């Protein structure tokens, strides 16, 4: 039986482990926490992160990193803040026979690097190959076996196909892309726009405002993505528009949930630490703030989310600032 290891036993890692077991893999699900790993292994359920979804027989949960040695298919599903550390810890256990799929959505704070750039920097010379996995996919729905379409991205089509094939069984439909920059950037920016949409919903601003945020969010995502070398058309796909629609409208989104409590008037320092930690958009807003400024790209929604999260801006003033910007012609994919 083919073997796979999933690094990170949060909601997404657990759902992907369950899915890979469905596809016929014998899966090691690595949790950094020994006690939690033992509890999930015993209960056959990850009660902490994906409650109510049973772990199939093909999944073993363990905190023993050395068990990754010799496993050819690796999936990284830790938060963006942990990717460099976890990739570094994997060094002794991977070799040219190991291929890695990175399912983390975000940018590295400080460096502003994309996740595949971090992965390649830390493990690139050891791995046989890598790819990015992204798209509109709530862990709970994938875990429960609901139909989902995702994208696996790698500049080389054959390599993308090799990794995509791991995940190709019901209920996932897996597309490939040769644009990892565009695919990843979409997954990072949508988290920030989902916070904005949550804020608008929390303030009761209505469906018109939400549609405007999705559309103008797509415009700023595309502007930055193209400036970083991504392909404009990628942002109209699953990992751009698709994931924006999901997270800006779906109450399961942690980023949307965070925005909603802020929009309802909860001050930033009163937000539940778990929600703050689990919303990748917080780290992405900080990273994108610097990145957009460095590249001279205008990202007004991202900028206002950054101000609300990091500078204590009142969401009502943030909305006013966006509405009072100088009127201009609408050029959705490359203009203002
Ligand atoms: N949850 C989803 O629906 C979903 C879907 C697609 C992509 N993603 C992305 O997957 C990534 C993980 O999200 P999640 O939802 O699984 O998060 P989560 O909050 O549910 O779980 C995070 C997991 O990472 C572990 N972790 C945290 N810091 C760590 C460290 N330093 N070393 C090792 N492990 C560490 C935690 O113990 C936990 O098991 C994020 O980038 C997220 O955007 C999530
Ligand atoms: O819960 P969120 O906001 O992290 O979103 C989860 C996934 O990224 C949706 O595709």
Image (spheres, helix red, strand yellow):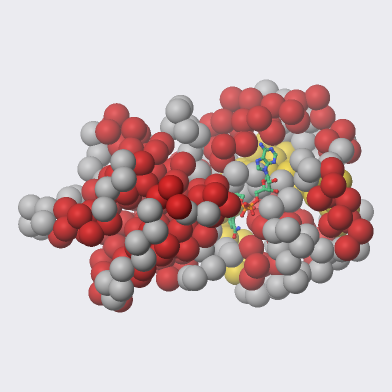
Q: Residue at x 29, y 29 (%)?
A: 294
Residue 18, quarter of the rendered image? bottom right
**Residue 150 on image: x %, y %:** 57, 61
Q: Relative to residue 331, is residue 1 drawn left or right?
A: right
Instruction: Count numbered badges in the picture.
Output: 0
Determine if residue 101 is in view: no
State the image coordinates of residue 263 (x, y, percent, origin top left). 35, 63
Q: Is residue 77 left or right of residue 59?
A: left
- Residue 281 place in picture, x, y as percent: 45, 49
Indicate the position of residue 273 as horizontal and vertical percent values.
54, 49
Q: Is 119 placed above or below 143 here?
A: above
Residue at horizontal 73 percent and vertical 58 percent from the top: 48
Residue visible at 82% across and 63% down in the picture: 45
The one nearer the camera, 58 or 203, is 203
Q: Is residue 103 left or right of residue 317?
A: right
Image point (65%, 44%), residue name: 78
Near-viewer residue (264 or 183) = 264
Observer-nearest residue: 33 or 268? 268
Picture quadrant where residue 1 is located: bottom right
Question: Taking the image as drawn, is residue 82 in sight?
Answer: yes
Residue 303, picture quadrant: top left
16 to 311, vertically: above or below: below
């Amino acid at each position: 039986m083919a073997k796979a290891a999933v690094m990170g036993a949060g909601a997404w890692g657990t759902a992907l482990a369950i899915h890979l077991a469905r596809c016929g893999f014998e899966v090691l699900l690595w949790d950094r926490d020994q006690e939690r790993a033992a509890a999930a292994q015993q209960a056959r359920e990850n009660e902490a992160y994906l409650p109510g979804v049973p772990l199939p027989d093909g999944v073993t949960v363990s905190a023993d990193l050395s068990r990754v040695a010799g496993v050819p298919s690796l999936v990284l599903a830790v938060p963006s803040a942990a990717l460099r550390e976890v990739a570094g810890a994997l060094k002794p256990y991977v070799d040219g026979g190991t291929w890695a799929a990175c399912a983390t959505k975000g940018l590295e704070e400080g460096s502003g690097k994309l996740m595949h750039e971090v992965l390649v920097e830390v493990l690139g010379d050891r791995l046989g190959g890598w790819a990015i996995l992204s798209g509109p996919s709530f862990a709970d729905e994938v875990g429960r076996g609901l139909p989902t379409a995702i994208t696996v991205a790698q500049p080389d089509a054959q390599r993308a196909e090799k990794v995509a094939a791991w995940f190709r069984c019901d209920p996932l439909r897996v597309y490939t892309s040769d644009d990892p920059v565009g695919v990843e950037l979409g997954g990072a920016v949508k988290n920030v726009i989902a916070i904005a949409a949550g804020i608008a919903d929390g303030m009761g601003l209505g469906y018109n405002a939400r549609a405007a945020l999705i559309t103008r969010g797509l415009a700023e995502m595309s502007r930055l993505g193209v400036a970083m070398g991504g392909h404009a058309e990628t942002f109209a796909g699953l990992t751009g528009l698709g994931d924006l629609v999901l997270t800006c409208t779906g109450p399961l989104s942690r980023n949307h949930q965070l925005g909603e409590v802020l929009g309802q008037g909860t001050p930033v320092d009163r937000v539940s630490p778990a929600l703050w930690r689990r919303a990748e958009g917080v780290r992405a807003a900080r990273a994108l703030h610097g990145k957009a400024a460095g590249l001279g790209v205008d990202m007004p929604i991202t900028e206002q989310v950054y101000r609300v999260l990091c500078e204590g801006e009142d969401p009502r003033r943030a909305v006013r600032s966006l509405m009072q910007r100088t009127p201009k012609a609408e050029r959705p994919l490359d203009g203002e």
